[in-house]
């Protein structure tokens, strides 16, 4: 049995191993080392939640603290990657993507196509998502569907430490621009993670459990809630399959379709919104492609279409949870 | 000294600074108990900046604030009780508990919001100043931002924008030496150490002042704001100051020299300096300042007590206020 480590340490380890394996891997971000320009010890922060702590002493030339200039440093990660580096840009909170979006949206994503297949831009952007900390409307969002809407970007959303390490290694090694979303509530989650380097292919869903009645598709933190709901439902004889797509672009459609073909029922759980989001997209694809297998209308369990509230009672009401998932599953069984 | 300030003005300015200090020190204590949700960034140590500027402003003048926004709110006249309740996430909060510490706003007071996005303020205040200019009502827009935020493209673009359109806008840089754990020396390499020199390059008057000296800030602001009200365009004021707590509550601050804050509190505290200046000049009695101190302590205590017992927002509030109509 492998040792158990936290999600954030799994990310740190993937970063370290990739930087050891490949000298072209660099890390750019705010306080990713910390204490730059002071007379105190560097590596004071390791990012705002300490995820990259310990990397600076190992790779002082390649762990680069930047000014608060997201357009410049995320753009520089893109540009350096188009010139032979394999840059990882840490966008502290995904909510800040508005500041630098063009560098991903019109630049990184489109180089290869616009330039007739000549460009390779192996950049990875690591960024935090997720509500649940009373961090309010500008530090709690999960805007990955906005990235997934852009041809040319890959979107990776791990739900556990093992996947985080393998998927980050795969993202960094991947030759296309990858946006890697880390749910802040998962950082302290522990799980078995092998010490050595490994990768998990991008575009391969993880079937967490199989059950004959309902297919639940869930992402990131929602996977835990789905598991909780499934346990409860199992007591009433309702057996759930849980699929974690792990990447939403590329999406492992086959895994979802083949499961729905077996169960005939679908619930999609997403912490983001239903309108133009991952949940509606999965329901739409399923309806179009395996309509004949459906025994009931697919259900979406998402956040309501409002910004993330600050007050803890409102935030709890805002977030999907096991009870909401359970209710949605029961609805598909009616 | 400072003849233009009446005793009443001096006491009012002192009271505002004291309100900020006591409010923040109390939030610090309450946060450490684990009772407050979310991220909290405190303004203690920087009081002379917010108050020195805002003493010149009225409710028509707009300010934009930062993640470290409590001080700007208080200086602009936002009520303490509502602010405290907002930080507690209560229904009685300034924003009904929906925004929290990082998003306190009171538009009636011309306070356009604390902000979770570093560098978001300058363009917004350029817009406020443009509206002032077009309405010809003599109002001004003031943006507060940090040394870290000074590196955002939004700030550079807004400086050029304000000069191009000759806007009644004041850029107030709060240079406290750090952006999170990163020194200004690293992230804003300006030959002279004064970030204000950048602004001069954009073609606007720019000054650097001792941000812990209320009177220095007040004078620089007075000149800039008067010029802006008369159609003289934007000004950049850099205030050198110091934050007394961590970047956010919970920050271990290993990037700071051990006695940096202790020394600053002892010899460079904006409130102590203000008190010494006005009492030694015989403008205000020490006892009068002490009376303010006591009254503010009571006021903050009352705000905390009220916030503690206030109800959380009604659950219906989750779905309201997204749009005006939809
Ligand atoms: C666009 C954006 N980037 C990064 C952050 C994270 N962040 C919050 S405050 C801060 C430091 C700001 O430093 P400064 O402007 O000097 O203000 P101070 O905290 O010193 O008052 C950072 C990096 C953010 N909130 N928004
Ligand atoms: Mg600063």
Image (cartoon, coloured by chain):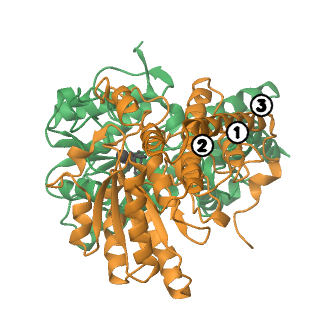
Chain colours: A green, B orange
Q: Is mark 3 within 8 Å of ligand 1?
A: no
SS class of the residue under badge 2? Answer: helix
Is residue B230 depicted above or below A1 in this figure?
below
Residue B205, how many percent across, how many down? 28, 71
Chain letter of the residue carrying label 2? B
Query: 10 Å neighbourhood of mark 3: few (<14), some, or many (≥20)?
Result: some
Q: Is residue A4 above or below residue B36?
A: above
- Looking at the image, residue A4 sits to the left or right of residue B204; the answer is right
Q: Mark 2 points at which residue?
A: B19
Residue under disc 1 on the same chain as residue under disc 3 = no
- Residue B150 appears in the picture as rendered: yes
Q: What is the secondary structure assignment of the residue under circle 1?
A: helix
**Where residue B299 is drawn, which disc sits there?**
1
The secondary element bearing badge 3 is classed as: helix
Q: In which quarter of the image is the C terminus of chain B?
A: bottom right
> Marks 1/2: CA distance?
8 Å
Give the residue pinned by disc 3: A233
User: Mark 3 and mark 1 in contact (Cβ < 8 Å)?
Assistant: no
CB atoms of marks 1 and 2 within 8 Å: yes
Residue that appears at 67% across and 57% down = A306
A42 or A54, which is in the foreground? A42
Q: Are marks 3 and 2 on the same chain?
A: no
Q: Is residue B93 above or below residue B32?
A: below
């Amino acid at each position: 049995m492998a040792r158990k480590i936290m999600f954030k340490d799994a990310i740190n380890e993937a970063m370290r191993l990739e930087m050891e394996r490949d000298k072209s891997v660099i890390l750019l971000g705010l306080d990713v080392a910390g204490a730059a320009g002071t007379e105190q010890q560097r590596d004071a922060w390791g990012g705002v939640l300490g995820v990259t702590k310990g990397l600076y002493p190992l790779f002082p030339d390649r762990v680069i603290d930047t000014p608060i200039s997201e357009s410049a440093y995320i753009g520089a990660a893109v540009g350096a990657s188009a010139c032979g580096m394999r840059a990882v840009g840490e966008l502290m909170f995904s909510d800040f993507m508005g500041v630098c979006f063009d560098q991903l949206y019109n630049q990184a994503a489109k180089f290869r196509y616009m330039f007739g297949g000549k460009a390779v831009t192996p950049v990875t952007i690591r960024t935090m998502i997720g509500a649940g900390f009373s961090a309010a409307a500008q530090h709690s969002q999960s805007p990955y569907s906005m990235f997934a809407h852009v041809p040319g970007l890959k979107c990776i959303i791990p739900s556990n430490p093992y996947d985080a390490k393998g998927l980050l290694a795969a993202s960094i090694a991947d030759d296309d621009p990858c946006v890697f979303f880390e749910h802040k509530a998962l950082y302290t989650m522990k799980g078995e993670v092998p010490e050595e380097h490994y990768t998990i292919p991008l575009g391969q869903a993880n079937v967490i459990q199989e059950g004959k009645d309902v297919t639940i598709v869930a992402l990131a933190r929602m996977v835990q809630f789905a598991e909780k709901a499934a346990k409860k439902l199992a007591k009433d004889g309702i057996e759930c399959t849980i699929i974690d797509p792990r990447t939403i672009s590329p999406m492992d459609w086959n895994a979802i379709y083949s499961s729905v073909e077996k169960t005939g029922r679908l619930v999609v759980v997403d912490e983001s919104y239903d309108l133009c989001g991952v949940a509606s997209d999965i329901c739409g694809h399923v309806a179009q492609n395996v309509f004949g297998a459906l025994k009931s209308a697919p259900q979406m369990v998402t956040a309501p279409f409002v910004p993330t509230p600050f007050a803890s009672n409102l935030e709890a009401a805002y977030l999907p949870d096991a009870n909401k998932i359970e209710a949605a599953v029961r609805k598909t069984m009616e | 000294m400072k003849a233009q300030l009446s005793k009443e003005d001096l006491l009012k300015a002192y009271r505002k600074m004291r309100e900020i200090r006591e409010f923040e020190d109390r939030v610090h204590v309450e946060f450490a108990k684990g009772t407050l949700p979310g991220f909290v960034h405190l303004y203690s140590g920087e009081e002379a900046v917010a108050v020195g500027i805002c003493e010149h402003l009225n409710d028509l003048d707009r300010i934009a604030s930062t993640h470290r926004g409590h001080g700007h709110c208080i200086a602009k006249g936002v009520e303490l009780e509502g602010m405290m309740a907002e930080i507690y996430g209560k229904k009685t909060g300034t924003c009904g508990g929906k925004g929290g510490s990082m998003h306190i706003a009171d538009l009636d007071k011309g306070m356009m919001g604390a902000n979770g996005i570093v560098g978001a303020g300058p363009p917004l205040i350029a817009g406020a100043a443009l509206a002032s200019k077009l309405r010809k009502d003599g109002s001004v827009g003031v943006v507060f931002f940090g040394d870290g935020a000074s590196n955002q493209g939004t700030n550079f673009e807004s400086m050029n924008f304000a000069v191009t359109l000759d806007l009644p806008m004041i850029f107030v840089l709060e240079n406290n030496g750090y952006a999170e754990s990163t020194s200004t020396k690293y992230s804003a390499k300006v030959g002279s150490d004064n970030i204000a020199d950048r602004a001069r390059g954009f073609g606007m008057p720019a000054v650097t002042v001792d941000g812990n000296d209320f009177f220095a800030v007040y004078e620089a602001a007075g000149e800039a704001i008067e010029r802006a009200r008369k159609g003289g365009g934007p000004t950049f004021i850099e205030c050198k100051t110091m934050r007394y707590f961590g970047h956010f509550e919970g920050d271990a601050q290993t990037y700071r020299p051990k006695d940096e804050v202790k020394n600053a509190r002892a010899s460079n505290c904006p409130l102590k300096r203000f008190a010494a200046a006005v009492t030694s000049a015989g403008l205000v009695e020490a006892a009068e300042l002490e009376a303010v101190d006591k009254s503010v302590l009571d006021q903050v205590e009352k705000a905390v007590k009220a916030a503690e017992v206030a109800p959380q927002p009604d659950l219906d509030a989750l779905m309201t206020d997204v749009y005006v109509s939809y």
